[in-house]
Image (spheres, grey):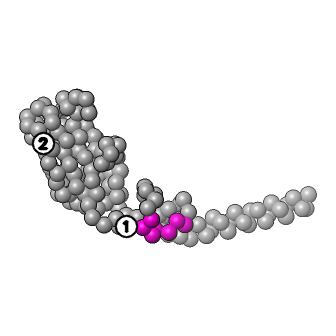
Amino acid sequence: MARITTTALALGAALLLTACSSGAAPDASSPAGEAPPAATSDAGTGSGTEAEAGAMALMAVVGSADDPEAYEISITDADGQPVTSVPAGDYELTFVDESTMHNFHIMGPGGVDIATDVAGSDTSTVQVTLEPGTYDYLCDPHPTSMVGTLEVTG
Ligand SMILES: [Cu+2]
């Protein structure tokens, strides 16, 4: 009995210590551990918000790969994978709008308000600085069925 209690107490103390030491770190950056923020080639650890230099690529896509007139809208990375959250920073945003009835319209923090033409196609690339917050994008003619958000983290 006594031994069990002591063990339990020791365990409790250890847990408390752990809780205290982790709780003492005010910046809740990476609960995953102490991976140094050095620029390694490990892709996508997600931590360094200011680690990357230069603009990163995003695509603003209207329609699907098979059908530019499809009622779909998304923001993807350079590999075409959908993206819903990115760190703040400078981006090269490439529009992929080859539809004659849709457009891509994005607006949000920092005065960002960019829209492609509804009738015409647009595959241009613009430089955009994304600030922390929520960016909304939609197709102006179909704002309820073609709509999405991009969260930008600080
Ligand atoms: Cu549309």
* Mark 1 CB near ligand 1 (8 Å cut): no
* Numbered disc total: 2
Residue occupying image coordinates x 50% and y 69%: 36
Residue at left offset 16%, top offset 54%:
126
**Magenta region's main secondary structure?**
loop
Q: Which residues are magenta?
A: 34-40
Element under disc 1: loop
Please state which of residues 130 and 82 is positioned toward the viewer in this rendering. Answer: 82
Residue 3 point in image, percent of width and height = 90, 62
Judging by the rendered image, the residue that carries numbered circle 2 is 122
Residue under the image location 91 percent in, 57 percent down = 1
Against 73, is 31 above or below? below
Q: Check residue 51 in the rendering and tell me which mark sits there, or answer none.
A: 1
Amino acid type of disc 1? Ala
Residue 145 to residue 2: above or below: above
| Of the image marks 1 and 2, the number of the one nearer the N terminus | 1
Q: Residues within 10 Å of mark 1 (few under 14, many from 20)?
A: few
